[in-house]
Amino acid sequence: MQQTGQIFHKALVIGLGLIGGSVLQGMIDNRLAGRLYAVDFDKSVIHHAMADKLIQAGDDELLNLANTGVLTDCDCVIIAVPAFAVKAILEKIKTAIDNQLLPSDVIISDTASTKGNILQDAFAIFGELPPNLVLAHPIAGAEKSGFMARNGALFKSHKLIICPHDFNDKQAVDKIATLWQSLGASVDFMPSDKHDEILALTSHLPHLLSYALTYQLATDEENLNIFKYAGGGFRDFSRISASSPIMWHDIFLANKQAVLQGLEDYQAILNQLKADIENDNSEKLLETFEIAKNAREYFGRLLVEKEKLKNL
Amino acid sequence: MQQTGQIFHKALVIGLGLIGGSVLQGMIDNRLAGRLYAVDFDKSVIHHAMADKLIQAGDDELLNLANTGVLTDCDCVIIAVPAFAVKAILEKIKTAIDNQLLPSDVIISDTASTKGNILQDAFAIFGELPPNLVLAHPIAGAEKSGFMARNGALFKSHKLIICPHDFNDKQAVDKIATLWQSLGASVDFMPSDKHDEILALTSHLPHLLSYALTYQLATDEENLNIFKYAGGGFRDFSRISASSPIMWHDIFLANKQAVLQGLEDYQAILNQLKADIENDNSEKLLETFEIAKNAREYFGRLLVEKEKLKNL
Ligand SMILES: NC(=O)c1ccc[n+]([C@@H]2O[C@H](COP(=O)([O-])OP(=O)(O)OC[C@H]3O[C@@H](n4cnc5c(N)ncnc54)[C@H](O)[C@@H]3O)[C@@H](O)[C@H]2O)c1
Ligand SMILES: NC(=O)c1ccc[n+]([C@@H]2O[C@H](COP(=O)([O-])OP(=O)(O)OC[C@H]3O[C@@H](n4cnc5c(N)ncnc54)[C@H](O)[C@@H]3O)[C@@H](O)[C@H]2O)c1
């Protein structure tokens, strides 16, 4: 891990769930900020973070905390609330800046899984794309969620994607990149539309496809009986069907365009496979499966390398 | 585990891979047969089984072994070769019976993942459905394959489906049920078309859907680069894409009708989800995902119970 020392004077984390809590913990463990503050509309989480002396102060309402004046020299806000709640947070940040409770050049960053929609929201709220708004997405997670599941090393050896926009301040982007590198992540840059396309394929689509098959089995005439006959293949394939319906609902709608495009391309492949099975097109079927198998084995090797890096 | 003692006087296992090897090992561990024989067209496997004194005799060719006369009082043949190879084995068994090298009332059973096609093949070969042909399918497996991966306890606490046909001899069916119960499996009975329908949904379809998405990513313009951004959800979803192309090609074609029907129903669900996303139909999306999530959690509990039974 890079040794960087303090990056921010005063940092504020909004949303102390798995991701926000892990960012906070990682910033503490690596001494990346002089002072740390937090906002979460769940009071108990703030109490907990205060009691454990993880933060200097916190509140369940951003504007209350800002009104105390402690954020007038805050230089970084990390928004780690569910995607659909980011818009309301950006509105409050705008209000705080307008009332000089937050500096106008405060770096604003996020962790959300979709990016295009946040750029749109930011543009609508600020009337421009703020130069200090740096969109970031850690490709990391855990089965568990919430503050108690936080882990300062969660991002170690994982990718973090930054989506710079056309009006970004280079220094702001660099600082956010340094922050995540200091948390152990490997930072890549790409435009937000590319990000949304890639994530639609690698993350959003698998969730949709898994939900769809589990739903099909659950509503089969055999009813839940059918699950008695499902084995290890289905177990792994369907694991993500147990993900939060609300969170995924939000993501599919927030990334609607890219998800629908990915789904259409997928449907074309399914139609082709269907025709190949109907017509006993062995050659074509074997070719398709071979390409998939090789790609999955390549992906498996990437995962092994990542694990090795993690244990360094 | 039930204590049954010897079920068969002389049993022959054809195909000493993961499944055949595990049946053989389980029969030895539980002393279920007086004498054991094996056939596998891979000579080294037979040598190995002989050297380890697991079998009395074996050969890479069924008719060679039969010609030695050791099978004239064999009362059970378990066919555990890949599905597409079962037909050729049944033909050889017919020849051996016709030449009085195998008794005409020998119980013939299998382990294949598809059943309708085997019934058809058997009918074509024997001119009837042999009363002593008992179709069985263990819902168990392992990442590994081949004889060296064999495990006498592989079937413990797993389902085994027997598909009795209309002309089955009840005693033959009972003996095969007892065999698998003695190996620790929990035996269910269902008609072969029901079996093929259920397996299409719980096993064959997930493999097809996983192959399709991994293929889509592998052929994306980003090429293999895209896998850098895939996380744990995709990892689990796509694990079965690394399965044997030849084996799955065979299964999709062997179970063509049920696979295509399952696929059509799946496509209808995908189309509905697509429309729901297009139309921001939050209520419908949430309802679908909730049903899937609940079903997956129910399935998860079934798995936990199975694990508990396994460790008894
Ligand atoms: N969990 C993952 O695997 C993962 C991975 C990458 C990115 N993300 C993204 O990171 C963000 C946070 O995810 P998480 O897994 O930490 O979620 P989480 O559910 O664990 O935590 C979210 C936290 O935000 C708080 N919160 C919600 N709305 C709020 C509001 N309006 N004001 C203040 N606090 C609010 C909640 O009380 C909770 O403590 C999401 O945008 C998610 O898409 C998650
Ligand atoms: N592996 C599983 O998860 C699993 C689960 C349930 C059922 N099955 C079914 O069980 C059967 C065996 O599967 P497996 O996983 O043990 O396969 P495997 O590849 O591990 O073993 C198959 C064995 O059969 C031999 N063989 C192939 N063709 C032959 C022939 N014509 N004559 C003689 N020997 C031949 C091979 O040399 C090999 O040793 C298949 O029908 C499969 O569909 C497999």
Image (tube, coloured by chain):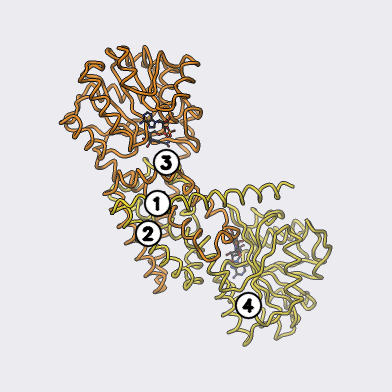
Chain colours: A orange, B yellow
Secondary structure found at label 4? helix
Where does label 4 land, which residue? B90
Residue farthest bottom in this picture: B127
Q: Which mark is residue B231?
A: 3
Separation of marks 2 and 3 at Cα, in angstroms: 23 Å
Q: Are marks 3 and 1 on the same chain?
A: no
Q: Is A138 drawn above or below residue B107 in the view shown? A: above
**Mark 3 closeness class: few <14, some 14–19, many ≥20 residues within 10 Å:** some
Picture quarter with the N terminus of chain A: top left
Mark 1 = which residue? A208
Give the quadrant of residue B82: bottom right
> Within 8 Å of ligand 1, the CB of disc 3?
yes
Label 4 or label 2, whichever comes before in sequence order:
4
Q: Are marks 1 and 2 in contact (CB under 8 Å)?
A: yes
Q: Mark 2 highlights which residue?
A: B270
Which of these two is toward me, A70 or B183? A70
Identity of the amino acid at label 2?
Leu
Disc 4 and disc 2: Cα gap in Å?
A: 41 Å
User: Where residue B208 sits: x, y (%)?
Assistant: 44, 60
Q: CA distance from mark 3 to mark 1?
A: 15 Å
Q: Nearer the viewer, residue B28 or B276?
A: B276
**Camera-nearest residue between B92 and A39:** A39
Instruction: Identify the element where label 3 is drawn.
Output: loop
Q: Which mark is nearer the camera, 4 or 2? A: 2
Q: Residues within 10 Å of mark 4 (few under 14, many from 20)?
A: some
Indicate the secondary structure of the residue bearing disc 1.
helix
